[in-house]
Image (tube, helix red, strand yellow):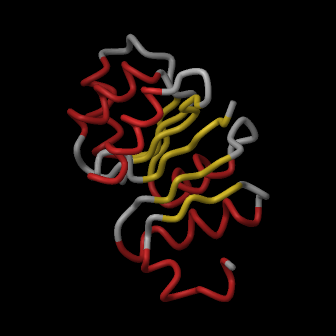
Amino acid sequence: MKRIALIGSTGSIGCSALRVIESRPDAYRVVALAAGKNMDLLAEQVRKFQPLQVAVLGDREAESLKEHLDGAEKTRIVSGTDGLIRVGTLEEVDTVISAITGAAGLVPTYAAIRAGKNIALANKETMVMAGPLVM
């Protein structure tokens, strides 16, 4: 079973990845999610997939997600760049899907590579900015 961290879970690629994961519960487990601003959708994803950890853009989004979840979930919420790095380097994760848009994907993707994770890269900016480092 592949244990997945999905960075960019509320975007179109992230949502598509979650549909595939949901269709194969024997093959995949969502361990961590990360998203920017769509806390409504992220809260739905947390309820459905029950990840160990979720990273959001900042403290405001973390508070919003906590309100959406109403304390019912046991998922740990982290924020900022450090939160993205944590999600991608969790010991329980073996594969990171990097679907976050723009340059924001470089740091967590590189951290995941350094931590020995398998990377499914759906972020072209990471390749443009640091191709030799991530290859």
What percent of the width, then of the height, locates residue 27? 61, 29
Q: Residue furthest top?
A: 72
What percent of the width, then of the height, locates residue 131? 60, 86
Viewer-nearest residue: 4 or 51: 4
The answer to whether residue 74 is above or below residue 128 is above
Q: Quadrant of the N terminus?
A: top right
State the residue at coordinates (63%, 59%): 119
What percent of the width, then of the height, locates residue 111? 67, 64
Res. 64 image quadrant: top left
Q: As drawn, is 115 to the left or to the right of 60? A: right
Q: Quadrant of the C terminus?
A: bottom right
Viewer-nearest residue: 42 or 64: 42
The answer to whether residue 58 is above or below residue 126 is above
State the residue at coordinates (52%, 73%): 106
State the residue at coordinates (43%, 16%): 73
What percent of the width, then of the height, locates residue 15? 32, 43
Viewer-nearest residue: 122 or 115: 122
Q: As drawn, is 38 to the left or to the right of 123? A: left
Q: How many marks?
A: 0
State the residue at coordinates (37%, 48%): 14
Viewer-nearest residue: 55 or 123: 123
